[in-house]
Image: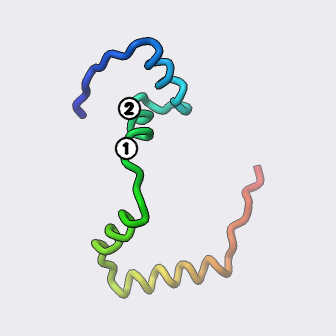
């Protein structure tokens, strides 16, 4: 992965640092705040490009039906 070094004044650095969550990198913070947000239109266009076989769709339906009969339960810690 290629990298670039940038210079920030202390105020800009502190603003960026305050937006970090956990072990998030500064690159992840910048991408989170400046990447274009995906829309439902993006999702629909992506769906148009996906081709699933009838066999795959049937398997998905069977899995969904099976989960209706075996509901998830909370894990005891």
**Dot 2, crowdedness within 10 Å: few (<14), some or many (≥20)?**
few
Q: Residue at x 47, y 25 (%)?
A: 16
Label 1: which residue? 35
Drawn side of residue 56 relative to residue 51, left or right? right
Drawn side of residue 65 relative to residue 75, left or right? left
Residue most extreme to the right: 76
Task: Using the image, tell me which numbered label, if any, was put on residue 47.
Answer: none
Q: CA distance from mark 1 to mark 2?
A: 11 Å
Q: Quadrant of the N terminus?
A: top left
**Within the image, what quadrant is residue 48 found in?**
bottom left
Q: Is residue 1 above or below residue 47?
A: above
Q: Foreground: 13 or 59?
A: 13
**Within the image, what quadrant is residue 67 found in?**
bottom right
Mark 1 or mark 2, earlier in chain: 2
Query: Which element type, helix, strand or loop, lies under badge 2?
Result: helix
Q: Foreground: 32 or 72?
A: 32
Query: Which element type, helix, strand or loop, lies under badge 1?
Result: loop
Label 2: which residue? 27
* Image coordinates for residue 49, horizontal then vertical, percent: 28, 72
Mark 1 or mark 2: which is in front?
A: 1
Residue most extreme to the left: 2
Drawn side of residue 33 relative to residue 53, left or right? right
Q: Residue at x 38, y 66 (%)?
A: 41
* Image coordinates for residue 4, horizontal then vertical, percent: 25, 24
Q: Residue at x 41, y 51 (%)?
A: 37
């Amino acid at each position: 992965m290629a990298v670039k070094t940038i210079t920030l004044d202390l105020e800009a650095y502190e603003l960026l640092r305050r937006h970090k969550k956990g072990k998030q990198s500064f690159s992840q913070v910048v991408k989170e705040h400046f990447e274009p947000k995906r829309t439902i239109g993006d999702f629909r266009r992506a769906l148009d490009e996906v081709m699933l076989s009838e066999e795959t769709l049937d398997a998905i339906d069977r899995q969904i039906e099976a989960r209706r009969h075996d509901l998830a339960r909370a894990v005891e810690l």
